[in-house]
Image (cartoon, rainbow, N blue to C red):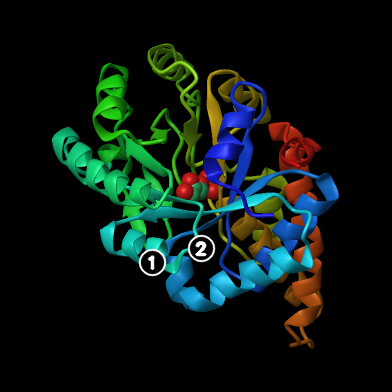
Amino acid sequence: MKVKTQTLLNDCYGKYALAAINVFTMEQVLAVFEAAEKAESPVIIQTTPVAREYAGAEMILSMIATASRMFPKVVYSLHLDHGNEPHIEAALDSGQYSSVMIDASHDIFSTDVKRTSEVVRKAHALGIPVEAELGVLSGIEDDMEIEDSLAKYTKPEEVLDFVTKTKCDSLAIAVGTSHGAYKFSGNQGIRFDILEKIQSLLPRFPLVLHGGSSVNQNEVQRINKFGGNIKTGSRGVSDEEIKQAIQLGVCKVNIATDLRVLWTGVHREFFHQKPDLFDPIIPGKIYRNELIETILRKFDLLGSTGKAKNFN
Ligand code: 13P
């Protein structure tokens, strides 16, 4: 059952968070739905513009729609992640998205306000909620790389003005996480001092944590053991950080890297151990099953397991 993203976000504030999972392939689409059905967990399925280009927008949207018919009990919403105006227009025209994100965070404040407000006006006219972003995350997201030196924490003193002016429905904030496999090293971690200030200025307003992957170090070791060369010595977002962030108003946790790292680990191990095989469906099945387990653990961590009943 597809529902408005805002319906999901309103239910979870301060209690649990939604996994917002980026999908690119058929195996990922099926694993998300299968895990959500098993856990009776609501879920947000996300497509980035690159996902729409890779499979073709029609193909990825058809896969999601088909999966929702195969798993009719699953409560989900479909979100456009990191859109710009043309992507958002295409998503709104398709009539299939439950929410869109305008990422104008790389612009100066006034331009971010202007671009976001315009998108909000168009999306709200169609009853579609909008996620906006204030502050800049570093790291690699699909085809875009932002250097650490260009990352900027969200300034708490700007958030109320931004939300009031743009009328956005949820806000992605930059509190130290980054996209990709290399998030924190040394003593780095989520800046809870910033997050706390933001929440106190925007009470009950849904906040979004981009860069929410945990980057399982066992998975990194598996990749490197079987011929990969992923840098070690940094970490993703810890379980404790996720739990604390939920208490401070984070309702949506974006996850893409954990799916990719798992894919790489499964396939590197498989083809290393079975160098004579060449059939994609054998490792494909292993990936799908391991991904289901990974997503089930995410639902437990975020506290969304069993919450689908809140929407019936
Ligand atoms: P990760 O790279 O931590 O998975 O974050 C993904 C994300 O924020 C997508 O918008």
Q: Mark 1 points at which residue?
A: 93
In the rendering, which numbered label is found on residue 152? none
**Height in image: 14 above or below 41?**
above
Q: Residues within 10 Å of mark 1 (few under 14, many from 20)?
A: few
**Height in image: 188 above or below 92?**
above
* Label 1 residue SS: helix
Q: What residue is shown at x 58% (from left), y 38% (from top)?
A: 7
**Height in image: 90 above or below 97?**
below
Q: Quadrant of residue 199?
A: top left
* Label 2 residue SS: loop
Q: What residue is shown at x 67% (from left), y 64% (from top)?
A: 28
Q: Mark 2 points at which residue?
A: 96
Amino acid at dot 1: Asp
Is 64 on the left-hand or right-hand side of 173? right
Amino acid at dot 2: Gln
Q: In which quarter of the image is the N terminus?
A: bottom right
Res. 137 in view: no
Q: In this view of the protein, which residue sits in the foreground, 233 or 32?
A: 32
